[in-house]
Amino acid sequence: MLLQQQALLRQKLLVLGSLAVGSLLYLVVRVGSLDRLQPTCPLDGSLRPPDAGQILLRSLQFKRVLLLHELRKGNGTPEQVHLHAPVQQLPRALIVGVRKGGTRALLEMLNLHPAVVKASQEIHFFDNDQNYARGIDWYRGKMPFSFPHQITIEKSPAYFITEEVPERIFKMNSSIKLLVIVREPTTRAVSDYTQVLEGKERKNKTYRKFEELAVDEATCEVNTKYKAVRTSIYTHHLERWLHFFPAEQFHVVDGDRLISDPLPELQLVERFLHLPAAISRSNLYFNATRGFYCLRFSLLFNKCLAGSKGRTHPAVDASVVEKLQRFFHPFNQKFYQITGRTFDWP
Ligand code: A3P
């Protein structure tokens, strides 16, 4: 009898213990993934106190959680309910390109900020005539739900090079903030080629070598008809945008530095978007296996970009690399002049 009672007690304790551990784990994951707060204990040893911006942001978040709790219980005025209900907002900032510049990494990293909500998919609203004909409400309907104090960001890299896009975006919002992420132009062109090559190989198709596509066989000059080359003439595309938007509405992100040391680049974007500084070193960690920085949302929730980001590039003939670098040089100089941002590209 006594043994039976002891066994029953042990069973009860076991169930209670598992429930307590389960709830604790649930809370840690949920708080981390929903509100994207930084871990209370940064893992990289940088125990700097949060700055004023972060404290303000956290207290705002806390107040919002309290208010939402009250609203959910039905204790809010209709105005409060309306003001604080999540809605689908049109983007107030767009990552317009450049393809293979690091557009996905930039979007995902900005999404670490509690005041930023990303549109996960590339919507291709402004560059695709069929989508554009569906109208602005269709576009809004593709946006994630967010709170009024948050900003939505969408990225579709094809926007940068598509003729009609700047005017269409201007018609939606003439004061929208525009982000352009660039990499050294020859590296970007090879990255572009690598993506197409992988697609061909997946379909068991053959594809010409990069050197054959990038250099015109007849003239031995750089082949400007090759799309991967044309896309890397950044100034050529940017100048079209400047017919609609002033240079101050653009922020150029250094895609090469976003790979090697992302935080300073993200901090520049925070400033450009007038957001309080909230992304910190503890949100990013270098993953040696991937060879890239990955994202840390909470103590238990980390994420690296998909394997399609960070492919191994094929070796390219040194003379072709040099030819391309010489070709891009004058365009790069003009790009620096227009944007006010200089890179150490060859
Ligand atoms: P590669 O695949 O050539 O290395 P996009 O998202 O615009 O297509 O850009 C893809 C590029 O993002 C990749 O090009 C990769 O170098 C770069 N990138 C930048 N930060 C990254 C990160 N944290 N993880 C993976 N790729 C990253």
Image: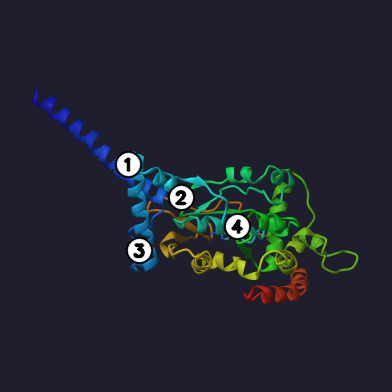
Regarding mark 3 in the picture, which secondary structure is present there? helix
Q: Can residue 289 be seen by looking at this rendering?
A: no
Residue placed under numbered mark 3 in the picture: 55
Q: Is residue 77 left or right of residue 139?
A: left
Q: CA distance from mark 1 to mark 2?
A: 19 Å
Q: Callout 4: helix, strand or loop? A: strand
Give the image's coloring scheme: rainbow
At label 2, which amino acid type do we have? Phe
Which numbered disc, 4 or 3, marks the residue that appears first in the sequence?
3
Where residue 54 sits: x, y (%)?
38, 63
The residue most toward the top is 1
In space, the residues marked 1 and 3 are separated at their CA atoms by 27 Å
Q: Which residue position holds label 4?
A: 94
Q: Secondary structure at mark 2?
A: loop
Task: Give the image location of residue 140, x and y in percent.
Answer: 59, 46
Within 10 angstroms of label 1, few (less than 14), some, or many (20 or more) residues? few
Circles 1 and 2, Cβ within 8 Å, touching? The answer is: no
The residue wearing badge 2 is 147
The amino acid beneath tag 4 is Leu
Q: Dividing the image into four equal quarters, which quarter contains ligand 1?
A: bottom right
Give the Cα distance between marks 3 and 2: 19 Å
Please report whichever mark, 4 or 1, sits nearer to the chain's N-terminal start: 1
Mark before the other along the chain sequence, 2 or 4: 4
3 vs 2, front mark: 2
Depth check, front residue: 275 or 245: 245
Question: Where does label 1 land, which residue?
Answer: 75
Eye-nearest disc, 1 or 2: 1
Q: Secondary structure at mark 1?
A: loop
